[in-house]
Amino acid sequence: MDVGNMHLIKTLSMDIVRVVFSQTRSPLMMKILLAGYNLDYETIRELQAARPELRNLTPETISAAYARISRDPRPVHELRAVAREEVEKARQSNRTIVFGLGHSSVAEHAVFNIDILGISRLLVEEIQRFRLCSYTEKSQRYILLTDDFVIPEEIRDTGLEEIFRETVREQNSLYHTLYARLLPHVLEKNPEMAAVPEKRSTLEGWAKEDARYIVSLATEAQLGMTLNARGLELLLRRFAAHPLEECRAFSQHLYEKTFEIAPSLIRYTEPTPFDRDTPTALRRMTDELIARHAAGPEEEERNSENRKDWQRGDVRLIDASPDADDRILAALLHTSSRAPLDRCRNLLHRMDTVEKIALLKEAFRFLSEHDAVQREFEYADLTFELTLSASCFAQLKRHRMATLTVQDYNPDLSVTIPPAIIEVGMESAFREVIDRTEAIYRQIAQTVPQAAPYILTNAHRRRAILKVNARELYHMARLRLDAHAQWDIRRLTGNMLTLARKVMPLTLLLATGKDGFAAAYGTLFSDRQQE
């Protein structure tokens, strides 16, 4: 018997042992215990009132127990029992491990659910910059808005409060007028849906989502937020350094509501020089560099010509991973074999397009419109520059697995006007309110520039840089290219995908909305019908 066969028999023997072991030992050894779950805070308060002796109703005990796992041989459920009995010792342990030894991940085991009411849409955008949190927001697409709005403290302090109020009221008045005009228009354009009572709310939502383009970023919002103690501390510190008073007030109120619950996990909440001073320093240096190296008209024109091939609408593809398709295919080969990555890449150089598509088809064969593609699709990146409305940005910012950075809202970038508003003959009225809004914006900006964006509307635009990998772009396509998606972000995502296919045509063969998946899948696997 040769060495290869001996090795094979030995391997198979070990596999048999593993199977027998898993069949006889694993079910007996495995133990899953529920350590805890979030409760409504009012329920906790009622329990505390009924049982005053209870002092351990804090998420700190779980953090402390899990922190001890690495150095204490006792089972974790016993460690939790000790922490519940000795809350002060648990807190001291947290302070030592989180802040003394720097193991901040321990704080991630303590989770908070936060109700947030009476804040502006502008503040919502700042809150949702924090990616490792969960948010559910009052939707301006589905709820008919009233006239509630936030008046920033900066505005109150400058004598501009009345003109601010008048402008927002004018915006809100047009909002209601637009909705009244848009609803019958939408119903008339979609008679089959309008005839089904269950679908009328969808049509009403379409009218609301277009009317909302005229309401301001000062409009009141509410949301539910879930975050862990580590993310909470970062949010508190960053907002304490924010130039907007509303952000700083939010930080203070949030601290007051959470510190007493988990004092051992929330410690560094004061603004640091890095958080407070870096944005201002960067803006100052950027202004100097732009003034020093401003391009002439001829150079700008040449640059514009060079960019045309990589631009579609308000989307520009700035950068992409070279050989993007091959990067992903090599990763698929690597995961599915024992070959090193360089060998997988060399193999790809010898493969033709037919073989590459065959490999991709195996990755896609059992895919449905509800499945995420494999993680290997994260090895190819694309960077886009986008010009988008506040309404569109409100949806884009929810894709928190991407990297997204933004400029301030800029009236010089014009506004996005929903086509339906033009169709019902309201474009002129819309633009008149926009013009008055921008005049007030400029007036506010002369005195308190940081607060001027509050008066701008959902139609106003900003520039953003978005970096996504192919896997996240698939997710965006499924959600934002579907027929149920809002038209503004559907158009943006479609333009992104058109440009992305120039650099990774194979990878994105099934990047569609959920409603288009069956057709794309059928086209890719059309050869199966012939077999």
Image (spheres, rainbow, N blue to C red):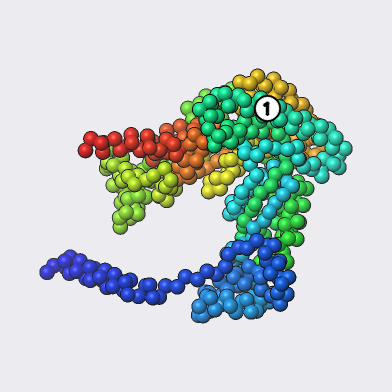
Image quarter (top left, top right, bottom left or bottom right) of the C terminus = top left
Q: Residue at x 85, y 35 (%)?
A: 162
Q: Nearer the viewer, residue 428 or 200?
A: 200
| Coordinates of residue 419 in the picture (x, y in percent) | 59, 24
Q: Left or right: where does residue 265 sit relative to residue 13?
A: right
Residue 226 x %, y %: 62, 56
Look at mark 1 in the image and give the residue it sits on: 180
Q: Visible in this render: residue 297?
A: no
User: What residue is at 58 percent from the left and 64 percent from the top?
Assistant: 37
Observer-nearest of 242 and 487: 487
Image quadrant where one finds the N terminus:
bottom left
**Splitting the image into 4 quarters, where does residue 146 fall?**
top right
27 versus 145 height, above or below: below
Q: Could you tell me residue 252's position as x and y percent?
A: 76, 56
Q: Residue at x 64, y 58 (%)?
A: 113
> Residue flagged by tag 1: what amino acid is it?
Ala
Give x and y (percent) for residue 112: 64, 60
Check the image and report above or below for 31 versus 133: below
Classify 115 as above or below 190.
below
The quadrant holding residue 489 is top right
